[in-house]
Image (cartoon, grey):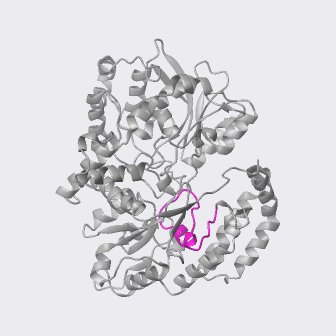
Amino acid sequence: MSMVKLATDSQIESETNSQTDSVNGAVNGAAKIVKLAVSCSLTALLLVSCADRDRSSGEAAASLKAENDPAYAAYETPVTLQIGFKIPDARLITGDTNDNNPMSRYLEQLTNIKVVHSWEAKGDEAFSQKADLAIASSDIPDAMVVDRDQLRKLVQYGMIQDLSDSYEMYGSSLMKEMYDATGGAALDEARFDGKLYGLPNIAIEADATSLLWVRKDWLDRLGLQPPQTLDDIARIAQAFVAQDPDGNGKRDTVGLAGYKWLVYGQKLNMSGFDAVFSSYHAFPKNWIRDASGSVVYGSIAPENKLALEKLAEWYRLGLIDPQFALYKEPQEPITSNRTGLFFGPWWMPYYPLSEAVASDTKAEWRAYAVPLDAEGQYVTHSAPVTDRYLVVRKGYAHPEAAVKLLNAFTRLERRQDPNEAAVRQIDEFAAKTGIQPRQYYPFDLLLDYTDAIEQRYHSVTDVLAGRRDAGKLDPDSRKIYDYWLAEQASPKKDMDGWKAAKAYEYGGLALVSRPMERVKSVFYGTTPTMEKRWAELEKLENETFLSIVVGDLPIDAFDDFVQQWKAKGGSAITREVQNLTSR
């Protein structure tokens, strides 16, 4: 995948993750993130040979609980739904295919909906290109997931169904509760003239926060305190470079890890420098309001110059990994245990830290919401409430079928499926094979609460502190609690459990440890001039920022960049964005 979207335990593989977009995304092939074993009902056919599949499928179908709720009730006669499918990285067991596997068979048995793949594409970019081609040729499948700009085009061309009635009649209470938790913002993103043309994903707010991950065992060996300010980070980086923190007698460690993209902007991943920019109140790659209230592109604000100057200083002094701009993947110095400092979202224990700790079990990582700004505040940016939408082709006879499927796998993902025996089977299957069922949901569209990470952290720690009964935990929190206890009992023996336990114990703690000032981007879409000029402007921005940091350009080159950006279409784009956001 491209730079992974940082996600919750239910979103880690997105869109890593989201990652995306994500990263949001943002999103690189580095992140092969393994999330918590999700809830999925599955039949005994998972553990039988292909020859026994028909018999076992019938037995499993008979064991499923019949339901009267329209959200979950199966069709009396089979319904076919053609979709565009994003191929995951997982390798299926012998005899299974992308459209005929444990997940697809289970959902078909549960709903009586036969999902057929009209086309498939691997990776976010290839999938988006396939969707663009389908839209351009007016030949979209019955249902597929699209981005914000594709949704706008589909509505403009009259190609998709109004889902207002289908959502009201067939949307589950769980789905509606999570949408309602956004204050209506998620569904509003998919409404045009009062009609609901798509069912959006829900972004996890925590995925937009860049934390500093630090080797605590290295701090302790060198007698250093955890950082708070930019100067603290610089001192620690210098010590990690010069004072042999790993104790191997060699000068082979680096300071702060980095990545050539420098800034992710919205969907975070590892080793970006977003937090450094935010500490100067700079928000590159976001559309923000300046002091006068005008909408401006964050990358051209003067505060960026201060952040770039600081990063260039750090690079010149050797505090940033000298090779950072050359890595193909950002995790390289982390998984090889050559660095003890990098920025990343709360979910870093899932990846890359799980791999790093597996190869060096002495490693002890901690997360901190730093650096603080000049006033001692921690500043970050907010995540877009949504960035993907499930749409249904206009004229398709059963638009509610897409809603029913979303109900079914959302309930599975949130560990609320009533078929307990089947859930145990899929958990065992996932643990044994490493194949996560969510990779084979028909749609890459996960729903959760926007503050899910903080909620679960507080729930689990309340139980651990005796303030709450473990029996009253919601299913997601209970799973984390179980992993947490198992990790305490046998540290680093079960790395799957370690990932979840430490992501919440350390990442979750950092998220709630101090007040955060969150700056919201006011625009995420595309304008007419963007469609023509944005690729060139992004290239100009990325190359200029990187060249300044590594010393190929002086800091004053930032001023030249701003003028070029405006002249090459940026001013026109800014006017378009201002017009759109003033409506």
Left/right of residue 272 with respect to residue 196 in the rendered view: left
Outermost residue toward the top? 76
Quarter of the view holding residue 465: bottom left
Quarter of the view holding residue 151: top right
| Residue 307 is a magenta residue | no
Q: Which one is nearer the viewer's eye here, 143 or 410?
A: 410
Residue ID at (36%, 17%): 66
Whether 107 is drawn above or below 570: the answer is above
> In this view of the protein, can residue 282 be seen by the observer?
yes
Whether 14 is drawn above or below 39: the answer is below
Task: Please state the extent of the stretch shown in magenta in the rendering.
Answer: 261-285
| Residue 266 is a magenta residue | yes
Residue 288 image position (x, y, % from top left): 67, 61
Left/right of residue 352 with respect to residue 189 in the rendered view: left
> In this view of the protein, can residue 496 be seen by the observer?
no
Residue 404 image position (x, y, % from top left): 49, 26
The secondary structure making up most of the magenta span is loop
Q: Which one is nearer the viewer's eye here, 170 or 194?
A: 194
Residue ID at (28%, 30%): 420
